[in-house]
Amino acid sequence: MEPRILLVEDETAVVFIVSDLLESAGYIVESAGDGEHGLQMALDKPFDLLILDVGLPGRDGFEVCHAVRERGFDGAVLMLTARGEVPDRVQGLRGGADDYLVKPFDSDELLARVASLLRRVRKEQLTPVSQFEFGGVRVDFTRGELWKGKNPVELTAKELELLRYLVNRRGQTLTREDILHHVWREQAFVTPRTVDVHIAWLRQKLEDKPNTPQHILTVRGEGYRFGK
Ligand code: CA
């Protein structure tokens, strides 16, 4: 299936040029002219990539990015920034964006970034595993069973879901917010601390030395990562 892209941009000329370019490259493109409308479309339909202009009427690109991530959007986000907004780049990437492009940009550059982001997203979406082994632990996510060596280990439904999320995104640093949105979704009464507590329980059950974990790693100041 062709990748679906949502372009949120208020400059009509840019919308025409970029949509044309992406469509002729074989992508399905929809567009919105302001942040509010863009956010609604991003939540209503499945998109693989959002291209967000930073300077938008109403909600700006950062707010849209933050809002879609908060609701569990796990596609890629490419921010378009104007020259002079350079310090904002960091804000964009921290706010859940994956990449940025400074306007005016070259069309080949745009296509290259889009292709690379989509490759990444598709790869992430293709990695889910039903069985997995690490450090003497064997887990069958489909049956909800786990063994450490020869001993069965009881995990709660939440612990299993958290482990599955970590394993499916192994090698990637995940913030507490990422984890909360994907594993706990919209449940009330959860805080980033909830993540820490469940991580500690998983380590207790699965790691040989829970205080010096080899698999469920802490990434200082950022979050957690499964594996190196
Ligand atoms: Ca703009």
Image (tube, rainbow, N blue to C red):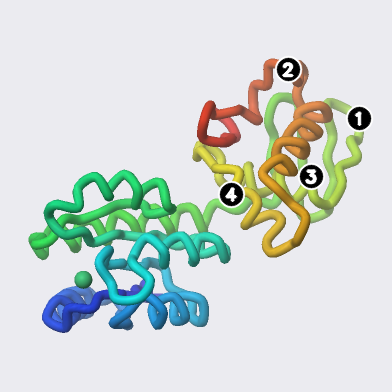
**Residue 139: x %, y % from top left:** 77, 41
116 w.r.t. 15: above or below: above
| CA gap, disc 2 and disc 1 | 21 Å
Who's the residue at 49% across and 65% down the image?
Answer: 67
| CA gap, disc 3 and disc 2 | 18 Å
Who's the residue at 70% across and 42% down the image?
Answer: 195
Task: Identify the mark nearer the N-term, 4 or 1.
Answer: 1
57 w.r.t. 124: above or below: below
Circle 1 crowding by C-alpha within 10 Å: few under 14, some 14–19, many from 20: few
In the displayed structure, does residue 101 sit left or right of residue 97? Answer: left
Q: Is residue 24 visible?
A: no
User: Foreground: 51 or 121?
Assistant: 51
Task: Identify the mark nearer the N-term, 4 or 2.
Answer: 4
Q: Which amino acid is tagged 2?
A: Asn
Q: Quadrant of residue 70?
A: bottom right
In the displayed structure, does residue 169 sit left or right of residue 195? Answer: left
Who's the residue at 41% across and 67% down the image?
Answer: 64
Residue designated by label 3 = 159
Task: Identify the mark nearer the N-term, 3 or 1.
Answer: 1
| CA gap, disc 4 and disc 3 | 16 Å
The local secondary structure at tag 4 comes to helix
Residue designated by label 1 = 151
Q: Do the numbered discs 2 and 1 sit on residues whose CB atoms are within 8 Å?
A: no
| CA gap, disc 4 and disc 2 | 23 Å
Image quarter where ligand 1 lies? bottom left
Judged by depth in the image, the label closer to the viewer, 4 or 1, is 4
185 w.r.t. 39: above or below: above
Quadrant holding the N terminus: bottom left
Q: Which amino acid is tagged 4?
A: Glu
Residue designated by label 4 = 177
